[in-house]
Image (cartoon, rainbow, N blue to C red):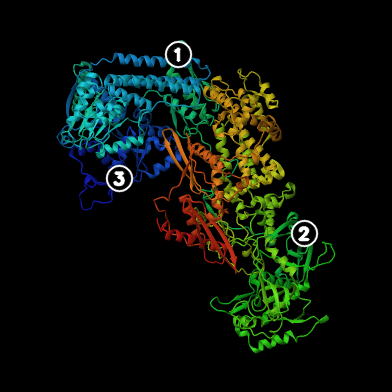
Amino acid sequence: MHLPGEEGHNPLKRSLSDITDGHGAAADQEGPKRFSPRRYQTQVYEVARRRNTIAVMETGTGKTMIAVMLIDEIGQAIKSSGDNKLIIFLAPTVHLVHQQFGVIKEHTSFEVEEYYGAKGVDAWDKEHWEKEFKNHDILVMTPQILLDALRKAFLTMEAVCLLIMDECHRATGNHPYTKIMKEFYHRSSMKPKVFGMTASPVIRKGVSSPMDCEDQISELESILDSQIYTVEDKTEMEVYAPTAKETRRFYNPTWFSSLDLKEKIKASWSKNDALFLTLQESIQSNFKDLEDKVKTLRRRLSNDYEKILYCLDNLGLICAYEAVKVCLENAPTSEECEVYRESSIRCRYFLEEVVGIIKHSLLNGVEIFLDVGFDYLKAVDLGYISPKLNELVQLFHSFGISRDLLCLIFVDRIITAKVIERFMRKVTSLSHFKISYLTGSTTSVDALTPKIQKETLKLFSSGEVNLLFSTDVVEEGIHVPNCSCVIRFDLPKTVRSYVQSRGRARQDNSQFIIMLERGNEQQRDQLYEIIKSEGLMTNTALNRDPEEIVLKPCTLDEISEYIVDATGASVTADSSVRLIHKYCDTLPRDKYFIPRPAFQFSYLGDSYECKITLPPNAAFQTLVGPACKNSALSKQVVCLEACKKLHQLGALNDHLLPSTDKPLEKDIITESKGPASGAGTTKRKELHGTTSIRALSGTWAEKLDGAVFYAYKFDFSCDIVTELYSGLILLIETELAKDVGNIGLELYLVSKKVKASVSSCGQVRLDREQMAKAKLFQEFFFNGLFGKLFHRINPAEKQREFLLKKETRKLWRQSYMYLVLPLETFNDSNNDSWKINWGGINSCVSVVEFLKQNALLGAQHCNGDARRSLQNRTGPSGTGCNGSQIFHFADSSVDENSFKDMVVVAIHTGKIYSVFEVLSDTSAESPFDTSEYNNYAEYFNKKYGILLMYPGQPLLRLKQNHNPHNLLVNFNGEGGSGMTSESGLVNGKERMYAHMPPELLACTGVRREVLKSFYLIPSLIHRLESLMLASQLREEISSHPSSLQISSSLILEALTSLRCGEDFSMERLELLGDSVLKYTVGCHLFLKYPEKHDGQLSSLRQSVICNANLHRLGIDRNLQGYVRDGAFDPRRWVGPGQLSIRPVPCECGVDTLEVPVDCKFQTRDPGIVVGKCCDMGHRWMGSKTISDCVEALIGAYYVVGGLSAAVHFMKWLKIDLELEPSLVSEAIATASLHSCNPMVDDIGILESKLRYVFSTKGLLQEAITHASEQDSKLGYSYERLEYLGDCVLDLLITRYLYQSHKDIDPGELTDLRAASVNNENFAQAAVRHNLQQHLQHCSGLLQSQITEYAKSLSEHDIGSKLQVPKGPKALGDMLESIAGAILIDTKLNLDEVWRVYKPLLSPIVTPDKLELPPLRELIELCGSLGYFHKEQIVKKDETVHAELSVQLKDVLLIGKGIDRSKKAAKGEAAHHLLKELEKRGIAHSGSARKRKLGAEQVDDTSPTKQKKTEMHLPVDTTELSSPATVRKISSLKNDIPVIKPINMKKGGPRVSLFELCKQQQWQMPTFKPTEKDFSFTSTITLYIPNLGNIECTGDPRSDKKSSLDSAALLMLYDLERQGRIIIGGC
């Protein structure tokens, strides 16, 4: 055999000195740790380089380092040659894998990884393994993992260049070492180099003769294809690995007679065993699970009995007592059913009885006997401790008080290690020793967990544990270099055990002590044979001449196996049994049924035949194997045939692993593209653009000869009759859909409501001049009302510029082109007639021209020439008609009777006003409002540099311009005060007026009614644009939009998230769409894949309906651009021709409107604000919002057109599915072939209860058959129909709730569905109608739980819901499966299923009967009142103890709960707290259940979002008994709370105060904001228990939120000043 790169000179190949020199100047300090090989290591290494070698060397002599040298040599050669080959290091135990992995990693520069079962390697597929092979050079693993990888064809032997086997003497019999070599190595065409390591090359217990020894060694060599090699000169080895000094320690035989005690214990065991037998015989024969459970517990009873007797005989009374205590600690406890409870009680009763028997025999307590001065000889005489145990104690005493001792004590049994360890801990004179034990990784109830054992071994290696009791788990290979003593408390059984355990003593002058009973010839002979075997083994190994030895060919027995042609994966007869069990483990199960194969043997005279029966949800049910010479072989052969058939059916893949369906079914949806990590989750946020509205794009502005527009009239009517609004007309180039261009909606103003109507008015043509004037009018009005007409040229200067003086083309963009113009007012009531108010438009155009020449933009305009020109324009003053006064305006003189309610513009500010009244008794010379100016004339002169020409004219009282508001939401209707939020919501502050001389105003020629109508435009246009987008999406979805008749408003609802704050959102439709999607996909998969079990169907369905996939589908269809996910901010609304005064420049790094789908535009940063757009339309959006939108659109189409419409939309999404009638017929045909179960008395009785008669009885038969009926050989069960029925009932109930409760909050609708669609509700319905009697099963546990559940429901007091046990899941499953059966029997008639099920499920919960889970109700109640709850969870044994507390004024209420699950314990504690709160008049009102935005849907000031109501709750200090207690708070806690530094950004102080209140459980403070002189001031009140109220008033701020922050900040500083908090902690 040649190594890679061995031919010729390899410059990259290092010499041995390069490998091992750790002291040279060139040694890499950061590289692998170097070592200097000993001479004998080099000797063995050189042999191993030349041929396959088994190194036979004493434990501790450094065999692993020889392997490291080989690894380094061969590994470097591989890298130099470029071969992609692996080095595999095998170790038989996980302990050794950990240890050898660490050594190799420390001493080589290669990529090393370790592999063992707990890492989940059994579930890895080929891709995973290939990744491991690619990324690592050396793989350290247990042999079973390599064997499995070879059998599954994840790896071939040809890919391995070096195979190292630690403890290779195990290569015998059916050990994985043997199977690796025989099944793969010896069959390989390119065999790897083999290096084995052992201290004992014999493969049996011992050797009887030199010939026997030679045969065993030859057999090992033959299997491993290697020759043994041992070092002849052991002088150097003795220096580095000195042999421990072997001594014998004799103890006297046990003479104490414990016959009476044994008889008593045996009598107790016999009595309880007899009761077990009686119980076992009383169980129905078909209830195999109960029978198995009782048998298991009966064996447990016998095992405990045997352990106690063993300890009594070998260790004495005290250790027997400890053994009983150990058994009691592990005693089974079960509350699942009566039989389980009785069986568990039997076991515990026996142990408690034995405790009493042994206690009676002990005169005093154990601890007293073991105290200082304890007379051990007397204890031996009394039988308290055995002579053997006494000898061990004396041996420990002989070690003195040195804490440097590390001693291993080997025992045979785990119970021995446990009880002696407990005993020694109680011996006071040995208290200076730290004592522990190891058990090995067994399934015994007494075994320690791998993690604890690993930690214990680490403590022993470091010297923190002195005495370590262990079974044979540490005999092999575990490296503890400081171990100075090994004691064999129990004799070794093999020469290997003898050699290995002795080798654990590594220190110089270490001891190997064997304990022997005096006069016991059997023990003497056993030890003699072991020592003789070692001698023979050593001599044979030394005397063999490697040159003369010829390896015997390995005998390869003919193997029955099945090989997959596509991959080379194989399964043999003996491995097939394990594979069948593994396949069954992947099948769906419940607590009443564990899927496993059943075998039935038939004796045929001279041979055996085996029949295998697989669970009903397997790919096939039964198979009979060929006849074989014995039953064991017949079982293997039939399993091999079963594996072959499962592979042919696709249940096992080409690597002979149970098939797992791909995450996405290709025939339903296309493969995913782009990054998917976190897609569809609430945590991931994504940057997306906004889709342009095609209907609003236009090129009309570029047409020189005019253009034709579609006209849409806006009419407004107020609920206050005297409030008049002018009509407006919308002109666009594209015709709108009928349900967009003809709508009505209500706009909500302060204390009034305006109904807006949009109607189509045909087409209108504007010539070039009219378009120019219309554009100029819109620019003037939009900027005057919603922006600024005068802009500063340079922010640092006072110089201003009239916006419309220069070219305004930049204010318009082709993608957003429309006109909104005023209409003339007609006196008749004919709404069909309309005419554009060209007079008003022309007048506004004249004003614009006037302002271009005469706007007073700065002090430089206040010169004589300017004033004269203004004076000349206004003309002389005088008296008008009827003696009315003529007023001099900036651009004209107007009669007093003409300008009432006229819209005017101030020529010095560009602001637009409406004239309210003439202040006849005032003039510009009247006193000014503040003392800063003497009069108005002085104010305008000093402030603006204007010298008034007509100071004597009366002032005009003007209604001021105001910001636009969101008029789409009725904030007054929610009980609010009408105050605005920062984003521009309706407020109720006092109307503000301005006083101004007429000569500074220009008349626009339009009336106030036009101005009022234009203030409605932002909200109206926003809604229209949303509907246009919805209509646009509708057109994309269907090429025949009229065929489905779905309205734009319904699609808009599906596109609108809760964050928008509208009175509609996608949540209701999303809830319905979720159910529709689940049903259609579930039903499609059920029909298309009749061979797949419910677990596979659920996996496939989940891959389609999961949020990640829906998100991907939505992104592929660009739904993200249509989603409305932010509240309408009217202050940022910008119409065509308008310049934004609140720009948000794009900082997203994207130049286009659409944002590419890229991971750089995705984040999980919680600080990212969602829903706020930049000027490019880019906004951050929660990833889940897109998935929710997809579901909502499915729901919308289902509402309008049923399943066909929903499927139509799904197909547009690229979810390709059909509910084909032919597949339904096939399902019915299959069910009609079901054999009838003779246990079913009368299907008709069940049909009468259901009030439905099945056409195909087999469907009902299948629907009521539990999988535990496997023994009945029916070959079917209800799991698939239950999967279908789950989808059906979910849709039917959700549809019913959606249709029945149209006005309730979406969150409450969700709660109703959760309360209605759950297994517990279905189980109760089944019992109410006595359907449980018809469930066919073979589970005694299930039968017992059904009986108890039915009884508890009949006795149930509705007011005490926590006392009701949870119903068996199988009952709810049966109800679901019957629904699935009816659906198939009716050929997918959902209405017929609902006709049957509505009475079964009645009464269906209604909002007034809805009960939230106690914990959620407590959280919502505390949230609504501003209280915080705290929880403390403690796990004790198998139960969870929960304690919840709520701080009222000066009373702390505490609720306690205990249960097996954390959730249930917290629920019980919350229940008790709610009852205690109810006693104090504090209860959850229905209105408090209104849906709130989730944590991810609010801004950074969310702690103050909730409205806090100041409440004075009664205080009751009466002490209550558990489970609810009341504690009166006597004083503040001693610890001063520390809070983080305060974030001074908006909302930061309130967040800090919120966190402080939560930490201390103080009630949330109340805020009272007030407004005065255009500023807000807030007062905050905080109640601290037993200290009362603290009140602070903040500084005035320009907006309300900032004033709240100011008050919160002052409160925090005040608390710090008083020494009640510390600010600035970590």
Give the residue type at disc 1. Answer: Ser
Looking at this view, is 553 or 1290 the one in front? 1290
User: Would you say 1624 lies left or right of 667 here?
Assistant: left
Looking at this view, is 1053 or 1471 the one in front? 1471
Q: CA distance from mark 2 to mark 1?
A: 92 Å
Residue 529, x across and y down, in percent:
21, 20
| Foreground label between 1 and 3 | 1
User: Would you say 285 lies left or right of 930 here?
Assistant: left
Say which element carries label 1.
loop
Mark sitting earlier along the chain (2/1): 1
The label on residue 66 is: none
Q: CA distance from mark 2 to mark 3?
A: 84 Å
| Foreground label between 2 and 1 | 2
Residue 929, x across and y down, in percent:
62, 76
Q: Residue furthest left?
A: 235
Residue 907, x across and y down, in percent:
67, 78
Say which element carries label 2.
strand
Mark sitting earlier along the chain (1/3): 3
Judge the density around disc 2: few (<14), some (14-19), many (≥20) Cα neighbours within 10 Å.
Answer: many
Judge the density around disc 3: few (<14), some (14-19), many (≥20) Cα neighbours within 10 Å.
Answer: some
Q: Which residue is mark 1?
A: 607
The label on residue 76 is: 3
Give the residue type at disc 3. Answer: Gln
Q: CA distance from mark 1 to mark 3?
A: 56 Å
Circles 2 and 1: CB distance less than 8 Å?
no
Circles 1 and 3: CB distance less than 8 Å?
no
